[in-house]
Amino acid sequence: MKYLNFLTLGVLAVASCMTFSACGDIEKEPSPNDGTEITVPVVVTGEASDVTENSATASITITSDGGAQITSCGIVWDQEPNPTEDLPTKVTFDGAEETYTCQLTDLNTSTTYYYRAYAVNEAGIAYGKEYSFTTGVATTMSVDVNGITIELALVEGGTFTMGATPDLIALAQHDPDELPAHEVTLDTYYMAKYEVTQELWIEIMGTNPSQMVRDNKCPVDGMSYLQCLQFIEKLNERTGLYFNLPTEAQWEYAARGGNKSQGFLYSGSNDATEVGWVEENMSAFGQHPGGEKAPNELGIYDMTGNINEWCRDVYAAYPEEPQVNPKGPKPSGSSAQYVVRGGSFLVESARWCRNTKRIRYPENYAQMDIGLRLVLRDPALGPEPEEPEPEPVITAPVVVTGEVSDIRENSATASMSITSDGGAAVTVCGIVWDDEPNPTEDLATKITFDGTETNYTCKLTGLSAGTTYYYRAYATNEAGTAYGDEYSFTTVASPSESTMSVDVNGITIDLILVEGGTFTMGATDDLIALASCLDDELPAHEVTLDSYYMAKYEVTQALWIEIMGDNPSMVIKNNECPVDGMTYLQCLEFVTKLNERTGMQFSLPTEAQWEYAARGGNKSQGFLYSGSNNATEVGWVAENMSAFGQHPGGEKAPNELGIYDMTGNVNEWCLDFYGPYPEDPQTNPTGPEQNEYTLRVVRGGDFHNDSVVWGRNTRRQSYPENYAVLDIGLRIVLNI
């Protein structure tokens, strides 16, 4: 962490904040005089937003004061997990409001911070859920070495064509070793604005090897490649940073102007004399202090002329294939020669100073017009990882199949990694898929790569909607073909299709599309006029949801038995009846195993998803119950039950969306912790972050309770997550 001493950014964060929204005074719970037990508050941490290189915005919401006045609350953060309120890096508030938003400032760049909300009352302190964020990268950076400043410019990563491209060939001649032009992708790095000076070399090494001693502000010269490595090692020991020579690709990308390139022949211009000291404009023999000529597009000076610059790579012919962060071949014996770039004050520009011009010298060679320039790996990333040594014995490659993402009706995104080439070049690799298990590379449904990289991401296309596919990665070398783990996924039906079916060993899960939209959740005035409401159904508040699929029917005993191997139901009449008698935690286990079987991503519905679907989604007619103002038309409730127990799904009328039994039959677990409603508009809410008694929401009413009291669309119940009873089941959703 030595580098923090040299960064211009501050170490200790000081946050400035303002109240984002005031929900009025917190409604106090009964005082101790009422005999109510005082508990610690319940506080929710908001996810960070507007994260920059040195700041972020965070929020806090107090959902319960615990029955006593909040004396202090705020947000605390640190570079280590689980920050506590005794740290100085915090923002405090007086607890008079429910919701606060503030900005965390003076943060370090490229640094991960952990933060959480807290609130204090007389019962003690409570913390919200911990989150983390990582600050951005500074566009410039300065490092102080005993009063000598190393100024660096950010070179944002990207992809460019390295070598003599046709546009540059048209401007000047080129050499054969500048071909073939090939695609190179680089990560972000910092590059020194100026060549290493004589004064910095003297500070680090104690001597000046320069053969041209004019001014200590001039670039150092006269050192070999090996001496450059010694200098960098000592510089890193002094600073605690990770300086290095640039790779040849890093050098050329920066010389071209990185992602700001204007396609110049030289670094910043098509006229070398504007941006560098070269043979054509030298009035006196020798190099000049940096910065006397114009910079290139990135604000970097003298990458054309002045002095040549050592690069990290062993000189070799260019490959034809695309490269990612290339470092050249490994040195082979004492005959290895290293790349030198940029030209110098001694030579004619068009021949020697072009951005693409390559020259080379042995590692122990020193000359008066060769110096060096530094690059810096982002300090937050630590040292550059060491490259693994090649395997002495050739085996089949080791390949890892990545989990699929971005599943759509006709496509999905998959990835693969080659973690070992087995000691020999991978000749081909790829991802193969089929609608039958164990697909092999001889199938036509595959994507292939040439094996020159280690990580690939690709899109599987031409898939059929609502279909299960099996896929795995493979790689081949001279020892044979190896496969990664097999995974499966199921494509989604087109959102234009209102229904979707998933087969589980002959048991069909029918799903209905619930198109996203905005609705008022809770007891609205029109529903209050039809029936009484409870306090926890208020305040009515605006909720916006994305589209999702919801099961037409409650999960049956048959499906539960298929997935879990047993039947927890306390009322067993028919396997087509809804399953009951399971806890919330057992529901989560069921969903996990169902997803493993199907390759899909089923879930319990959030409370908001449940109510929106029960109301009829964007087809809602404003009914008190799910599909009617008469509960007996759409559900089995106390008023129409002739025999004790639930019924198979679909015997009553559906709601506006075609979904059955969201009123009565059995109650249904929801995903959310139970807690009071917010007043502010919500988007895809998932409920409170925690609940003191691990109470989870239950919705819908059941077969043996009065519908007006228990079966309304807005009626909320809550039970501990380890509670099981004969009238609580579940319904599943599939998020798109």
Image (cartoon, rainbow, N blue to C red):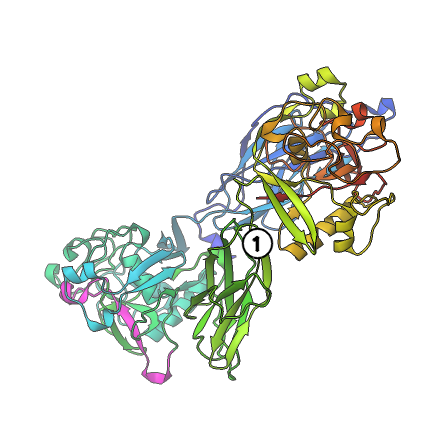
* Towards the viewer: 563 or 355: 563
* Towards the viewer: 582 or 219: 582
Residue 494 spot, x, y in % from top left: 53, 44
**Residue 180 falls left or right of residue 411:** left
Q: Is residue 239 above or below residue 388?
A: above
Residue 525 spot, x, y in % from top left: 67, 17
Decide if residue 582 is in sight here.
Answer: yes
Q: Is residue 265 above or below residue 473?
A: above
According to the picture, the residue beneath numbered tag 1 turns out to be: 467
Residue 521 spot, x, y in % from top left: 65, 27
Is residue 344 a member of the stretch shown in magenta?
Answer: yes
Residue 416 spot, x, y in % from top left: 51, 64
Query: Residue 696's image quarter?
Result: top right
| Position of the C terminus by quadrant | top right
Q: Residue at x 74, y 44 (%)?
A: 555
* Towards the viewer: 625 or 681: 625
Q: Is residue 396 above or below residue 602?
A: below
Q: Residue at x 53, y 81 (%)?
A: 395
Identify the residue at the far front of this view. 651
**Which range is magenta?**
331-355
* Towards the viewer: 273 or 612: 612
**Residue 92 falls left or right of residue 191:** right
Query: Residue 77's image quarter?
Result: top right
**Residue 159 falls left or right of residue 13:** left
User: Tag 1's secondary structure?
Assistant: loop
